[in-house]
Image (tube, rainbow, N blue to C red):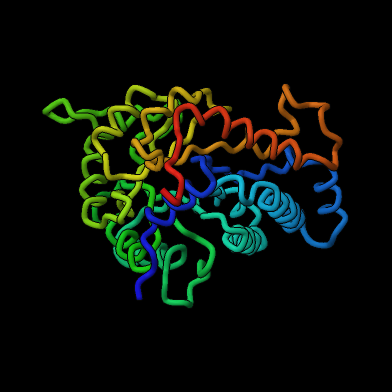
């Protein structure tokens, strides 16, 4: 029996929690609560190993704080890679812990390559053979389409075999996104629009019962007009939306991303939630050892902020 379709599992999780919030795990050493840094530095190992130990405690406590509140998390792989082998071991333990807590997991690695290299990347994160390090840890992976269609196929094939998904970079939230993404062809169509057309085609080849494919797209909320256009261009594509909160986009900016049933997208927030204890509006409201309460409050605030624009149909509907 094949694994359940990624989009169906995601739709169920969104309906079950009643919101589309994705919490990004982007651990930065200087921003961790001081007691966590102190404990990590008091233990053995190199500075990189100490940082990895601090990241593990921090991320596991965040998972405990938000489990049941939101449907999905998104660890940023780079922060763990920076800590070397110890950091990568922590990444897998964190992702598995999230899955065990009932959360879906997007590994934000932005991989992209051709041939056997792409197959190896895909197997590492999405493989269903039972032997890869990603077993039990990842539901979806972000990938980069810059090298062309043949970079996407190995990831999609591996993902579909294991009931996983991919999120393909289409219109990113960074200020310099237009350097390449806004380049036009002879018909006036921009590069990101061409990528969007391909992603919609790939999604149509593998639709779940919810009407969405396993091929998703990353579309930044910092370009709200284009977000609305891309939702129209990709009606069968689940969207991963960065840019909310710290990067400047608000709830109204992401509203066009959601279909009538409220399941078409997840909206990511990283720093605004995981480092909520340091936010100007929350500083001083919680004791140093109560920083998880700030995380929960910030998560609830985001859920409430998005609610008028996204009301998922209940799972029993």
Nearer the observer, 293 or 200: 293
Nearer the observer, 273 or 92: 273
| Residue 105 coordinates in the image, percent (x, y) | 52, 54
With 188 as the anchor, is 130 left or right in this view? right
- The reply to whether residue 281 is visible in this rendering is yes
| Residue 268 coordinates in the image, percent (x, y) | 51, 38
Q: How many marks?
A: 0
Q: Is residue 134 above or below residue 77?
A: below
With 135 as the anchor, is 164 left or right in this view? left
Query: Residue at 35% across / 43% down in the picture?
Result: 217
Q: Is residue 123 above or below residue 262?
A: below
- The reply to whether residue 151 is visible in this rendering is no
Nearer the observer, 222 or 28: 222
Query: Residue at 27% across / 59% down in the picture?
Result: 153
Query: Residue at 73% across / 58% down in the picture?
Result: 49
Q: Is residue 131 above or below residue 69?
A: below
With 141 as the anchor, is 196 left or right in this view? left
Looking at the rendered image, the quarter that the N terminus falls into is bottom left
């Amino acid at each position: 029996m094949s694994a359940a379709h990624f989009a169906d599992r995601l739709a169920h999780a969104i309906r079950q929690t009643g919101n589309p919030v994705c919490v990004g795990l982007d651990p930065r050493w200087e921003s961790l609560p001081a007691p966590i840094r102190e404990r990590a530095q008091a233990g053995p190992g190199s500075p990189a190993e100490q940082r990895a130990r601090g990241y593990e405690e921090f991320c596991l406590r965040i998972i405990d704080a938000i489990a049941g509140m939101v449907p999905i998390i998104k660890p940023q792989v780079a922060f763990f890679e920076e800590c070397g082998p110890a950091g990568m071991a922590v990444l897998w333990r964190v992702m598995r812990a999230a899955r065990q807590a009932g959360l879906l997991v997007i590994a934000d690695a932005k991989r992209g390559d051709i041939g056997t290299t792409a197959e190896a990347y895909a197997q590492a994160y999405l493989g269903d053979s039972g032997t890869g390090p990603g077993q039990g840890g990842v539901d979806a992976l972000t990938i980069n389409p810059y090298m062309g269609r043949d970079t996407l196929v190995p990831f999609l094939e591996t993902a579909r075999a294991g009931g996983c998904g991919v999120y393909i970079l289409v219109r990113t939230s960074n200020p310099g996104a237009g350097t390449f993404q806004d380049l036009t062809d002879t018909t006036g169509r921009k590069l990101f629009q061409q990528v969007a057309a391909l992603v919609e085609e790939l999604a149509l080849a593998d639709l779940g019962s919810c009407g969405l494919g396993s091929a998703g797209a990353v579309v930044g909320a910092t370009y709200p007009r284009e977000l609305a256009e891309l939702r129209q261009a990709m009606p069968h594509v689940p969207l991963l939306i960065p840019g909310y909160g710290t990067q400047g986009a608000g709830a109204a900016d992401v509203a066009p991303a959601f279909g009538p049933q409220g399941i078409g997208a997840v909206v990511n927030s990283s720093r605004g939630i995981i480092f909520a204890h340091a936010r100007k509006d929350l500083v001083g409201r919680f004791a140093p050892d109560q920083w998880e309460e700030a995380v929960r409050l910030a998560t609830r605030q985001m859920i409430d902020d998005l609610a008028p624009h996204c009301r998922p149909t209940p799972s029993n509907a």
